[in-house]
Image (cartoon, helix red, strand yellow):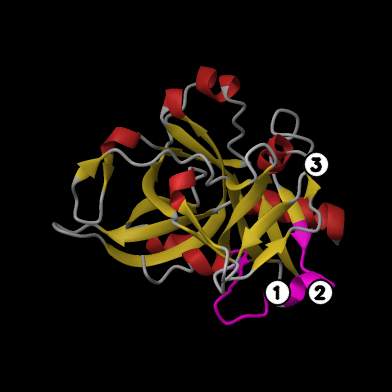
Amino acid sequence: MEDFPFESSSFPVLGLDDTTDKIKGVGTCTLTRLDDERLFLINSAHTLDIWGDNSPIFIALPNGKTIELPFALKTKSKSVDKVDVAVTPLLGSFASHFNDAAISSLPLYNDINSEDFNQYAKRVVFFGYPSSASRFSIDLKRNEIKAKPLCLTTTEENNLTKKTIETYDIDLSIHIIASFERRKMKEKNGNIKTSPRPQGISGGAVFFVYVEVGEGIDIIKGGEFAGIGNEYLENRSIIKATKKSAISSFIRKNFI
């Protein structure tokens, strides 16, 4: 998975808890592009709704900088608008924070032909920063916030019942649905263990990865940015993501 730009394109989103005066994980955001000149930072709308419109949120970049998110145009809410994204265009002084070799953007257009990989197994990889306090450390002297990310390799769920689709407000034209059982996740060495809770990875990049299945380790043959994570449905053992095509449509409707 070293070939994928996980930590260079998805960043932890943080807020200052007024009651404890401590930094708290809010979610994850992902840097995307419509083309080489138009870049947009994508959050999940529901994470910003939960945190509140009047409370500032911050983004910790891989170069050590922590910057405030100036604004985000949100979809109404995940219960009204299934896309569930918040979009901030990179403009002016805000954009200058992202001019760094350690930062990259992900395409909102199709940059590979997935049919070229039909002979390989398909995996769904979620990347993001869990909101648990144990995964954040603060260096006040250096003004740096460090966060430990989570990378989950799953499989796409294609056998959803009509009841599940209706109950969890799933739209297969908008959403990617992947199986996820915390107690059955594999480590890199193949051992089964319980993964950390994925709350906080909403807004993080989701990839389709095509692999040749091996006896000891799968060999990656290709991959593509597919969308952003949105919701962990623990009682159904699935994770929901918003497809990049839906994000692109929202941007074109509101910014272009």
Say which quadrant the N terminus sits in: bottom left
The percent coordinates of residue 43 (x first, y second) are 67, 51
Which residue lies under the disc numbered 1?
Answer: 97
Instruction: Report helix, strand or loop for mark 3.
Output: loop
Residue type highlighted by circle 1: His
Tell me which amino acid carries mark 3.
Asp
Task: Pick the residue in front: 135 or 250.
Answer: 135
- Cα separation, mark 3 vs mark 1, equals 23 Å
Q: Predominant secondary structure in magenta?
A: loop
Mark 1 and mark 2 in contact (Cβ < 8 Å)? yes
Horizontal and vertical percent position of residue 233: 49, 29
As drawn, which residue projects farthest toward the front? Answer: 141
Residue where numbered disc 3 is placed: 53
Bin the neighbour count of mark 2 within 10 Å (Cα to Cα): few under 14, some 14-19, many 20 and up.
few
Question: Where's residue 39, x and y in %?
Answer: 72, 68
Q: Regarding mark 2 in the picture, which secondary structure is present there? A: helix
Please give the label number shown on residue 62: none
Q: Residue furthest bottom?
A: 101
Q: Quadrant of residue 95?
A: bottom right
| 236 vs 178: above or below | above
The answer to whether mark 3 and mark 2 are in CB contact below 8 A is no
Query: Where is residue 217 shown, x and y percent of the image?
Result: 20, 60
Write the start and end of the magenta stretch as one range. 88-111
Q: CA distance from mark 3 to mark 2?
A: 22 Å
Which residue lies under the disc numbered 2?
93
Say which of 125 and 243 sits in front: 125
